[in-house]
Amino acid sequence: MTGGSGWRLAAVCLLVIGCRQVAGTVFDIPPKSGEERPATVARVPAASPLVVSEDTVRPPIEGTLNADSATAMLPRDHAGNIDWMAALRDGVIKPRSAIAGRARHLGEPDFRFAFDFYLQGPDSTFDAYFPHSSHTEWVDCRQCHGPIFRYRGTNISMADIFQGRYCGECHGKVAYPVNSGCERCHQSLPMPPDRAQPELLGTVTMRRVSLDSAALISDSIGNSAGVRTDELPPAIFPHWLHRVRFRCKACHVDLFEPRAGATAILMKDINAGEACGACHNGAVAFRAGFGNCQRCHVSNTLASR
């Protein structure tokens, strides 16, 4: 062996030894006997990035306003919950990443962060799978970091999640429920199939701004006609109807904070092209305002049909 070859071999060996811990994390190399398992075990994503074509050919599901019809079209996961990621992959839905004419954060409406990993559980059966790639198909990074999660070192318990914290901010409200979707995260946990009923989660009854109901609502508050609107039913917002057409990131967080009560929505803002008016302008969707009041201000009885 020549001197040059020997030095090169020694350098390679030192590099392998020095990087073993990093390689073990990234490529899930099992630790040596007696070594502690790392708290976060990284995985190479199983699925390749989705290629989403925002073409003019829209899927049939966009032709219905009926919740039952939409539910029948959407695929189910092992437990029986609606599987929105499968719907995306299979082309059942083709949600747009951004609203036409509005700039997207980072300038990348189809940004997908392909770093999926497992969080260590009490044993390997309860290791929890977290697919960054799936979440970034739908949500803007800012929606979770840092209002909900620090970028590193957040300790998450199931008790927190069941109380609506961390993952529970969305799961059970607009995404599959945690109490019937165990195997979506704990992939090694044996669970019986078809035990859940599919639900279109996330329909919201908007809470009115507190006003004197005997007074006329002035233009400064939001009604340009100065008429009373407190006799109309509260506005109903069906997340599912919008979700088949747009990804969450199209509206959150630039138009709406994704927390109940965090964003005040007034008709004067909508008429000015803000909030719901970014779409409901007669071009992207029906124009909000007089003549279409009943499209949003609908009784709970009708909204549940």
Image (cartoon, helix red, strand yellow):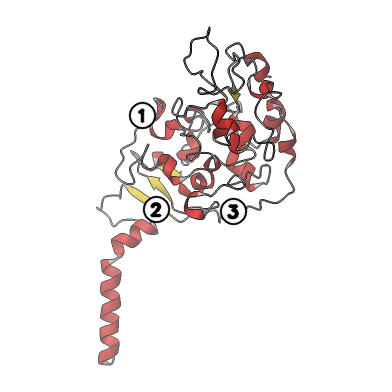
First-in-chain label (3 vs 2)? 2
Q: Which amino acid, mark 3?
A: Leu
- Disc number at residue 151? none
Badge 2 density bin: few <14, some 14–19, many ≥20, Cα 10 Å: many
Side (left or right) of 231 relative to 252: right
Please name whichever residue, 233 or 49, is drawn nearer the observer in this view of the structure. 233
Q: Which amino acid, mark 1?
A: Asp
Q: Position of residue 173 (x, y in %)?
A: 50, 28
In the rendered view of the protein, which quadrant contains the N terminus?
bottom left
Label 3 secondary element: loop
For discs 1 and 2, the disc positioned in front in the rendered view:
1
Residue at point 33%, 38% (across, down): 122
Residue holding disc 1: 160
Q: Position of residue 54 (x, y in %)?
A: 66, 51
Q: Position of residue 153 (x, y in %)?
A: 29, 44
Badge 3 density bin: few <14, some 14–19, many ≥20, Cα 10 Å: few
Q: Quadrant of residue 223?
A: top right
- Disc number at residue 50? 3
Residue holding disc 2: 42
Residue at point 52%, 27% (across, down): 265
